[in-house]
Image (spheres, coloured by chain):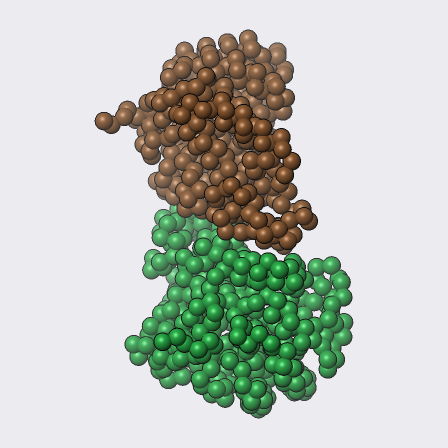
Chain colours: A brown, B green
């Protein structure tokens, strides 16, 4: 039986947690899933072969960066972003919206779109919903995102205005989406930490009938309590038969709390960024691998980790590479950190299928409290 | 039939070129061979798995660097440099002499040894022949090098003085070498570009009966003609039944000219250093991969290369990674450049065995003259 493109099948649930499968042209994506971020069409310091070996299935690339350099038209000429970076599994591109606000120098926001200056050379550019979709169609990822407006998560009045614009833009993105036989377009629910705005946004976005839905505007400075509470009230308002994607979230605890609240897909730069700064993510929390106490430590970063780094190298060696400012440190720690979150998502999926997610989540969260 | 440790068997010769096998505790080393350099116990930007996949068999590490950081005693505690960096094939350490002169701040040179300041923190250290061997025995590489004094290749009077000291130091190194069942010690012939000094040095060093001999003090600024001429007069003076190692040499043309003059082993930082600067070594010469003409070039760096990089990625992608200052560029170009020299050595070996080295060398050198 061939499964329909962009269909989402839920194989098991436990409470709000779900184990599902989302069908793309580049393979079936099993959820829950954690996606490492390949901002400039490369997950920093990792080859696609290393990504595949550590079990990554979904990779995100950033539309803003690739539009500016090397250009989405060049990537289209080279056969699309999969072919360009030689990642043959499912891919996702964001809309460019988040980076326009966080990296670009905003020149003007109006109802039609955003004019901004490039963080690379100060040149002037304009994104509209239509432009974002055209760029994402040039990139050719399996999942595209609607172009939205970002606002502070606790500024109610501005959020309300931004939300209305975001909903109008979502409808325009849907109109601009022409290659529905190749790429899925996900809607994004905004509304900061306010329940009524999230409800309003979920209703507006869900009414547009997208193949999947993202929860945006979280993990941007609000408290963990606010984030979990907002998730709790938002996911039940989204269509149960479509995948749910929590954007920009990637810690062990946030993945567990997210899955417990019905999230299926996560992405974050954190594992690779922490790696470049010498921090290892483990089941017991983060380790600063530059610490002098690791200088003569023959143990792996984590005794229970199955990644190439932990199966091969000692903490002493990783520390030496960091102290010596060797590039290999970033590679080895990125392998470990990404594997940690990829495996966590795999383990949560298996636990949901076994009906043991609640105990798995409780045990895993309890370990994080333990000192190393 | 088990072969004796550090025995060198010559399987074929053609003119002065030889195909041989040198036996170490970490395996049989087939020559000619090119060794990538892992200065700080890592070949920059490459995992040991990637090194193995690209066919590297011998890896060099730098005694000066590892003595200063993390310390040779720490590496000994961790089981030696093989175990520390998880490279399980043959390894070679230099004596630290070259780096003391090129990186350290020399405080005093006397007949006993050299006092220098660390390039890392300015701390004061002293290397003697005995100390260099003790450090190298702590590191535990399969091949160690005698501690020698470096001098300008065209300063005859100083070279003559340095040579006499180097010969006395070689005898002291040989005395200090205690673990002869684990590590081989190679003597080093010096003498700059002067035939009489090289002859004097070869005779003195060969009389000490080492398991192998290195030709030092070349590729340090002299002309190619001087280098090839010096090689030509030096190798015939070395014992024919022992391996010959030309230190610090690693271009396509120098490997060919070296093998033609009887060299068996080469090492150089060039392939990995060029990689970090965006240059690809190819059969047709070097390519600056940042060049705008590669922006939309879907071809691999080299159509005939069998490395992971060329089998997987386009020139356009490599250029994008370089322009975007992505670490992956250094990894992919290092894989390609090291593979280029490793394969060249393998091809020269095969050509010698077939009796076709002369034509292989001529054809390969001719290609280098061709424009890309």
Determine whether A136 is above or below A50 in the image: above
The quarter in which the N terminus of chain B is drawn is bottom left
Closer to the camera, A253 or A122?
Answer: A253
| Residue at 63% in and 81% down | B175
Q: Is residue B348 left or right of residue A245?
A: left
| Residue at 32% in and 77% down | B353
Q: Is residue A154 left or right of residue B55?
A: right
Closer to the camera, B307 or A137?
Answer: B307
Residue A19 location (% of width, % of height): 40, 24
| Residue at 42% in and 39% down | A55
Splitting the image into 4 quarters, where does residue B338 fall?
A: bottom left
| Residue at 50% in and 9% down | A200
Determine whether B64 is above or below B44 in the image: below
- Residue A58 appears anywhere in the view: yes
Residue A150 location (% of width, % of height): 56, 21
Splitting the image into 4 quarters, where does residue B190 fall?
A: bottom right
Closer to the camera, B79 or B61?
Answer: B79
- Residue A133 appears anywhere in the view: no
Residue A108 location (% of width, % of height): 57, 23
Q: How many marks?
A: 0
The quarter in which the C terminus of chain B is drawn is bottom left
Determine whether A314 is above or below A206 in the image: below
Residue B371 location (% of width, % of height): 39, 64
Q: Is residue B60 left or right of residue B306?
A: right
């Amino acid at each position: 039986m061939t499964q329909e493109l962009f269909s989402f099948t839920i194989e098991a649930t436990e409470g709000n947690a779900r184990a599902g499968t989302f069908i793309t042209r580049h393979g079936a994506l099993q959820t829950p899933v954690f996606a490492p971020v390949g901002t400039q069409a490369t997950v920093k310091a990792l080859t696609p072969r290393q990504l595949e070996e550590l079990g990554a299935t979904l990779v995100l690339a950033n539309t803003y960066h690739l539009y500016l350099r090397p250009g989405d038209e060049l990537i289209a000429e080279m056969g699309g972003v999969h072919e360009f970076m030689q990642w043959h599994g499912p891919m996702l591109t964001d809309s460019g919206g988040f980076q326009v606000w966080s990296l670009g120098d905003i020149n003007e926001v109006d109802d039609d779109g955003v004019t901004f200056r490039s963080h690379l050379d100060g040149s002037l550019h304009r994104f509209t919903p239509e432009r974002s979709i055209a760029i994402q169609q040039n990139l050719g990822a399996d999942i595209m995102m609607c172009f939205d407006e970002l606002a502070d998560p606790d500024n109610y009045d501005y959020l309300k205005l931004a939300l209305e614009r975001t909903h109008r833009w979502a409808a325009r993105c849907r109109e601009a989406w022409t290659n529905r036989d190749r790429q899925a377009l996900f809607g994004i629910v905004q509304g900061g930490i306010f329940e009524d705005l999230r409800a309003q946004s979920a209703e507006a976005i869900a009414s547009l009938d997208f193949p999947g839905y993202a929860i945006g505007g979280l993990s941007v400075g609000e408290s963990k309590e606010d984030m979990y509470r907002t998730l709790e009230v938002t996911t039940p308002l989204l269509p149960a038969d479509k995948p749910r994607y929590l954007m920009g979230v990637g810690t062990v605890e946030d993945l567990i709390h997210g899955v417990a609240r019905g999230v299926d897909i996560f992405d974050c730069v954190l594992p690779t960024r922490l790696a470049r700064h010498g921090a290892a993510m483990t089941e017991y929390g983060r380790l600063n691998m530059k610490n002098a106490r690791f200088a003569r430590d023959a143990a792996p970063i984590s005794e229970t980790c199955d990644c190439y780094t932990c199966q091969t190298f000692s903490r002493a060696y990783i520390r030496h590479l960091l102290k010596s400012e060797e590039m290999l440190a970033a590679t080895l720690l990125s392998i470990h950190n990404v594997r940690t979150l990829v495996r966590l998502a795999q383990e949560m999926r298996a636990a949901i299928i076994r009906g043991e997610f609640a105990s798995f989540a409780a045990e895993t969260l309890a370990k994080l409290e333990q000192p190393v």
